[in-house]
Image (cartoon, rainbow, N blue to C red):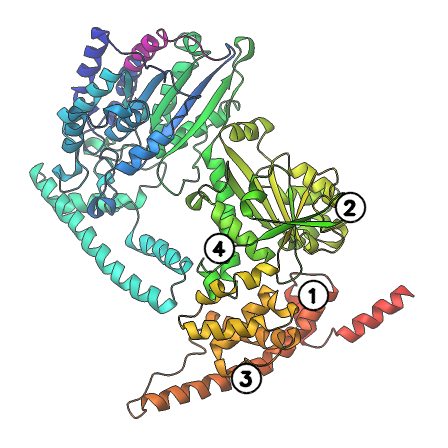
Amino acid sequence: MHLIPSIDEKPLINSVLKFYKEKYAVSSRENVGYVNKLNTFIGKSKKIAFDLISAQLKKVEPILDKDFFEIIVDAHGDAITNELELYAGQSGGALSQKGCKKAKSFLDEKVQGQIIISSDLPRTIHHSIAKYFPEKLDDEKLLNLIEKTPSSLEHNFGIMEKETHIGWVRYALDLGIIPTPLLRSQFYGLMELFPEKTIDERIEKLGKKWKENGKSDDEIKAEINSEKIRLQIIEKSCCDLQMKRFEQLGEKNPKKKLDEIMNALVMKSSIYYCMEGKDWQPITEVKTYMDIRVKSFMSLFLDKKLLYELVFGKRIQIVTHSGTIDNLYSFFGEYDSPGQVRIIKREKLPSRGESFLVRMDAPNGKIRAFRYLNDPAIIQSIISQTEKEISTLRENFPDEKVRKGTGIVKTEFYTLRKDESNKDIKKSCALEELLNDNSPSLVLANCGLGKTTCCLDLASRLMPENSIKNLVSEEYIPVFIRLRETKSIFDQEIKNKTGKSEYETLMAILTGGVSHLAEKKIETYRNNGKNFVFILDGFDELHHSLKPIHIFDSLVSDMSKLGKVIITSRYESFSEYESGNLGKGGVKTYNIDPASIIKNLDSYLSERFENKAAVGKLSEFIKNQSSDVKNNWLMVYFITEIYKENPGSVDTNSQVSPAEIMQKGIELFVWEHARRRNPSLFSYPPKTPSESDLEYKENRLVFFNEIKNGYLEEIMPKLQKIAAYMTVNDKTIISHDETLDILKGRWSLKDELEKRKTNEK
């Protein structure tokens, strides 16, 4: 491990401590602040930072090429939290155990900082210690500082005492960590001790989360009412505490002061807003002030009169806050665009804490540009898109268990090859082999065997929070695309005459999320154990002009340069043999094993029935059916749902055809979909006092059967017409006008087929 050089220059240490004893260098949660002395504050802070950094840089030798230097930028993880502080927007404490664990995980033995520069607040100093000095985490002196640092509004109203703050600064200096207020988060003063979001905003976010978790509308409504009351109580506690604080500070009208801050919170998100005190002087920081502060710090490394000559060939560690990352990000991004000033709001990660690496290239001493080598925000935008695809697909899935993210039976595969005597050799394999194989993978199966479900399961399990433990040798970043959904975009792009070929148009659609990444960036992600995996579902559902085998070869070959490729398809023109589709893309072929359905049938049914007798009865019935039924997940699903709806409608001693199952299954699916989308429309009235339990149950069943039959009699013929139109025209989406043409009888399957015969002649 690298040794961070110590700071043993006494004059330097004394100048730092003197600076922190001045009035405007206190914690950002006080109303007294540096804002009305901005230039003085930045100048003094910058001078101290320059002296400390230059002293440290002189002690370390170059470890990189002389034409560039690197900056590791970390944003700290979770701070110590309880519910009162959490809902009050207060995050000033030291790191929690979770935050320390994340800090440790950011340490890469091959890519370490030679000097550490941190924001001067506890949570960033704590992050630096956890990452580079984990042996110090149990130090009594550090534990004492953590205890004195407020992590709750009940502890000194969430405001850190000056001596405690200076204690953190001293501890950092003792370890060789350079603390600077130039890297703090935005100075909101007392506004930071109040909720960042309104109760309604919090409720809306929770409502979406509950819906994604499969809760019913009634359950969500009850949860919302309960949560709203709880949050109102917490918010009142925050306000009561602040009123006491204002009284202690000698405010003549604490209520007026509280109202001022509550009103200011509404404007807090504006980049131009700040609170003003006496004589109209600003007492909180405008976003543009913060930008000046952060970029003033960064200019230390790029001014030839300052640290420019010392920094090349070396690697610096910066530790700061998620808000400050936005300013650093915009600084790096705009550096090669002189004259532009932008404050870029990056997409935040789902949980606190991130780390990325930036390189400044300067061939022959001439500064060129910063470039990111592993920015997690880029990855996050890709992950967010995949999350959206997963959520959309789950929401529209007929199976309730799958909609809730459970109940998917693990897919099993087999490969097929010929031995020397031309005999077929079949080898079973699991998901691990498919993922760890460096070759691109083609997964083949007929309709109903679970290709889309397999893709959904794989994409879900590869998401960072669900990473498959001990399953893959690398960490994958999933990019999940349903190829059938690209048809409408493809048609529109071709119609717009963009000048691209059909293949170029397809590639632009498929790689839109990652195509902007330079080859170097992708290589750096790989070196850090992260690989993109493209899960492309339904090659057979692409636009007909894109199905030729040479298109498939080019697609696999080009996308494999970006990451691992997994494509699913029906057999159509593909061979089931392992190397039967080996073109220039070098694809290896896997087949979904139909026999695994019977093998996993009892497990599937047990997820859906509590009654073991029902599981046994239905399992035996399915196993006695023809292979077209028992070796097809779609058939199994329909039989299961039909039995759940009405066990008496399934004669468990009979044989049923796929056509019969499809007819009943589709009717049931359409009905359940309608009920799910319009619960109030199909709700039975509450039980009346005059009805017995048995009467209520019977009346309810009659009611639903009448509604269901009426609905299906009306809707099924229309759906059949629409399905016929989409099938013969190879469409997955149709316009409103097309739908009206079908329903009003302006299109018929008979006329369409006659027209095609005429055209062929």
- Image position, residue 123 (x, y; %): 26, 31
Q: Amino acid at mark 3?
A: Asn
Q: Amino acid at mark 2?
A: Ser
Along the viewing direction, whichever of 731 and 662 lies nearer the viewer: 662
Q: Quadrant of the N terminus?
A: top left
**Measured Cα–Cα span from mark 3 to mark 1:** 25 Å
- Is 166 on the left or on the right of 582, as rendered? left
- Res 421 label: 2
Residue stretch rendered in magenta on the structure = 48-64
Contact, mark 3 vs mark 4 (Cβ under 8 Å): no
- Earlier residue among tags 4 and 1: 4
Q: Nearer the viewer, mark 1 or mark 2?
A: 2
- Image position, residue 119 (x, y; %): 29, 25
- Res 726 label: 1
Q: Which residue is mark 4?
A: 391
Q: Which residue is mark 3?
A: 709
Contact, mark 3 vs mark 1 (Cβ under 8 Å): no
**Measured Cα–Cα span from mark 1 to mark 2:** 46 Å
Q: Residue at x 57, y 70 (%)?
A: 623
